[in-house]
Amino acid sequence: MTIYTQGLHLQFEGQNLEAVTLSLGIAIFPEYGSTSAALLKAADDALYHAKREGRGRVVMAS
């Protein structure tokens, strides 16, 4: 599953901030790892998948 994070506009003290992008990798315990190391690796792999696909998205581990 991929969710796109484009179009996020932020303001601080009335000023528009520069464009912000966010890429995330998500892994759920215990479905994607039964240890903290395995879960972190699954989330990390999903994060790099998101970045390879063009950034600005959230990818669930597979």
Image (cartoon, rainbow, N blue to C red):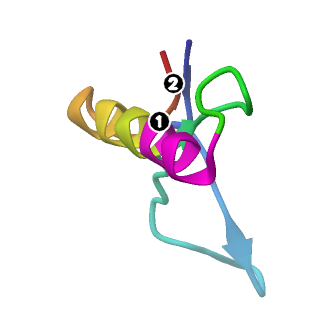
- Measured as percent of width and height from the top left, residue 48 is found at 30, 41
Q: Quadrant of residue 60?
A: top right
Classify mark 2: helix, strand or loop.
loop
Q: Which amino acid type is shown beneath numbered disc 1?
A: Ala
Q: Say which of 22 and 60 sits in front.
A: 60
Q: Residue at x 52, y 49 (%)?
A: 40
- Magenta span: 35-43
Name the N-terminal-most of marks 2 and 1. Answer: 1
Decide whether the magenta segment is chiefly helix, strand or loop.
Answer: helix
Q: Quadrant of residue 31?
A: top right
Mark carried by residue 42: 1
Q: Which amino acid type is shown beneath numbered disc 2?
A: Ala
Q: Say which of 31 and 22 sits in front.
A: 31
| Vertical comparison of 1 with 19: above or below | above
Q: Say which of 40 and 34 sits in front.
A: 34
Evaluate if marks 2 and 1 touch, with contact meaning CB atoms under 8 Å apart: yes
| Residue with the mark numbered 2 | 61
- Measured as percent of width and height from the top left, residue 3 is found at 58, 23
In the image, is 32 to the left or to the right of 47?
A: right
Circle 1 residues within 10 Å: few <14, some 14–19, many ≥20: many
Q: Residue at x 59, y 25 (%)?
A: 32
Circle 2 residues within 10 Å: few <14, some 14–19, many ≥20: many
- Measured as percent of width and height from the top left, residue 55 is found at 34, 39
Judged from this view, the residue extending furthest toward the left is: 52
Classify mark 1: helix, strand or loop.
helix
| Vertical comparison of 38 with 1: above or below | below
Q: Quadrant of residue 33?
A: top right
Mark carried by residue 16: none
Q: Is residue 36 magenta?
A: yes
Where, quadrant-wise, is the N terminus in this rendering? top right
